[in-house]
Structures are given as C-alpha cells and as structure tokens.
Image: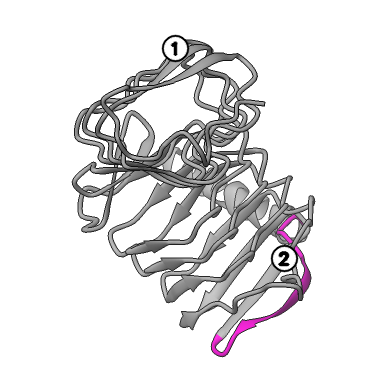
Amino acid sequence: MKLNSRVLIMSAMVLLCVLLLPHMEAEAAEIVDSGACGANLTWTLDDEGTLTISGEGEMEDYGYAASPWTGNSSITAVMIGSGVTKIGRQAFRDCSGLTGVLTIPDGVTNIGAFAFCNCRNLTGVEIGDGLVSIGEWAFVDCSSLTGFDVSTGNSEFCSDSGVLFNKNKTELIQYPAGKPETEYVIPDSVTRIGSQAFWYCTGLKGTMEIPDSVTSIGDNAFWACGMKGVLRIPESVKSIGENAFYYCSSLTEIDVSPENTNDCRAAGVPTH
C-alpha cells in the first residue's frame, strides 16, 4: 500500500513538471537586440534589461560615434563575460537605468575613459584581479555609488572603506559620490589626490584636512564638493590642477601655507 502511494505521488510530481515546463520556458528572458562590440565580442540585450557581453578580447572604444547603449535607460544590469579584456571608452556612458553592483571580472585589464560616466543609479563596483588601468572620468557622476570593492589579488588597485586607491595607497583615485558619510579623513599615505577624485561629492558636509604627505592635487579634484569652512593647503603641495576647487560653495577660504614657496595660488584656487 505504501509503495503504491509513493508511485502515485511521484507520478503526480512528474505530471506537474510536464505541465509547468512550457510556462517556465515562456517566462525566460527574450533577446530584444544584439550586435558586435569588438573584433571578437558580441552583445545581447534581453527584455528584462540585462546586457550581456560575450566572446574574447577587447571592446571597441567609442567617442563621437556613441556605443550601441549610450544613454539607454532600459539597461538595468551588465554582465561582462570572462573572456573580455577591455571595456571601451565611453562604452556605458549615461546608462542611467544601470542599478546595483557592477562586477568587473578578473579577465578585464583596462577600463576606458568615461566608460561608466553618469551611470547615476549604479551603487557599487567590484574589481577583479586583472585590472591594471582605469581611464579618467570612468566613474565620475555616478551619484548613487557608495563604494568600490577591489580584490586583494589585484596588483595595481585597492579599496579602503569603499574608496578607490592605487595599490600602495599613495594616490586617492575616486571617492564614491554616493557614500553616506558626511566627513572623510584622507590617509597620511596619500601623496596625490587624483583628477576628479571628489567630483560632486556633495554629501561631504564637514571640514576636510589635506595631509602634509600630499604633493599634488589633480584637475577638478574637488569640483562641487560639499566640504565647508577653511581648507588648508600644506607646504608639501607642489602643484594644483585646473579647477581643483571650483563650485565648492560651502568653502569660506582656501589657506595656502605661508611656507609653501610653490606657486599654488593660481590654478584651482577659485571656489565659485
């Protein structure tokens, strides 16, 4: 009797699977667009907003000729295949629908300039072992970005509390614009604050100290940053890039150390 009951239950389960299978297949994501994005790379976009890059090798660089996805707000996720070695210049610029955490696989060695610029709903970036180069403006204007997470096996970059640095933390490359903290202490190991490092970090509402270890501040480094009060430029700073402190409307003064004999009072000092 027990055997017959088990047979009946198993038969019912098999029948249920057979009945549900067509519906499951019907609900699978459907490819709505596709194309090539490199000599040996292809892409597909499904009706759920997932863009998948497949194949091996480098992605094309894009400039005045926009990538196939520039400004496409229907893209909500990007899946980069393990064979991809380069993410092209301006590849995903202005993809405002891209949300959640972006994973850069171990095979990617280069991210081109402006690659993810203005992806305003991207919240995190995970960087694999292989990345050795990130172009300027790659993650600028990602206003919801709360942190970078770099693999400990990466030889060129590291992250600390979500902030992106070079491996030995002598260059602060990118402070995430969506990071919720209102104050930040720049580590004493930093000798260079990179170009666009604190671009539009309006959430930083407190004062900021530039440590005596810093020798250079890149172009647009603090553009429209929310820091307030007096910002002291120490004696150690030898160069300040163009527009480094533009539109920092909450700063009341930029105080260049009297011991600083380098001409740091010109480029970058205007606050409005």
* Residue type, mark 2 in image: Leu
155 vs 32, left or right, is left
The numbered dot on residue 207 is 1
- Measured as percent of width and height from the top left, residue 119 is found at 66, 46
The numbered dot on residue 82 is none
The numbered dot on residue 45 is 2
Nearer the observer, 214 or 18 = 214
Q: Is residue 83 above or below residue 141?
A: below
Q: Is residue 189 above or below residue 108?
A: above
**Please, which residue is most extreme toward the bottom here?**
39
Which of the colour schemes (rainbow, by chain, secondary structure, one colour) is used?
one colour
**Magenta stretch contains residue 38:** yes
**Magenta stretch contains residue 246:** no
Which residue shows up at 52% across the image and 15% down it?
Answer: 253
Q: Secondary structure at mark 2?
A: strand
Q: Nearer the viewer, mark 2 or mark 1?
A: 1
Which residue shows up at 60% across the image and 23% down it?
Answer: 202
**Total count of labels:** 2
Q: Is residue 79 above or below residue 11?
A: below
User: Which comes before the other along the chain, label 2 or label 1?
Assistant: 2
Label 1: how many Cα within 10 Å (few below 14, some 14–19, many 20+): some
Nearer the observer, 66 or 29 = 66
* Residue type, mark 1 in image: Thr
* Quarter the C terminus occupies: top right
Tell me which segment is drawn in magenta. Answer: 27-40
- Measured as percent of width and height from the top left, residue 71 is found at 78, 56
Could you tell me how far apart the alpha carbons at marks 2 and 1 are, in whole angstroms?
45 Å
- Measured as percent of width and height from the top left, residue 79 is found at 55, 60
Which residue shows up at 73% across the image and 46% down it?
Answer: 96
Q: Quadrant of residue 22?
A: bottom right
Q: Secondary structure at mark 1?
A: loop
Nearer the observer, 206 or 21 = 206
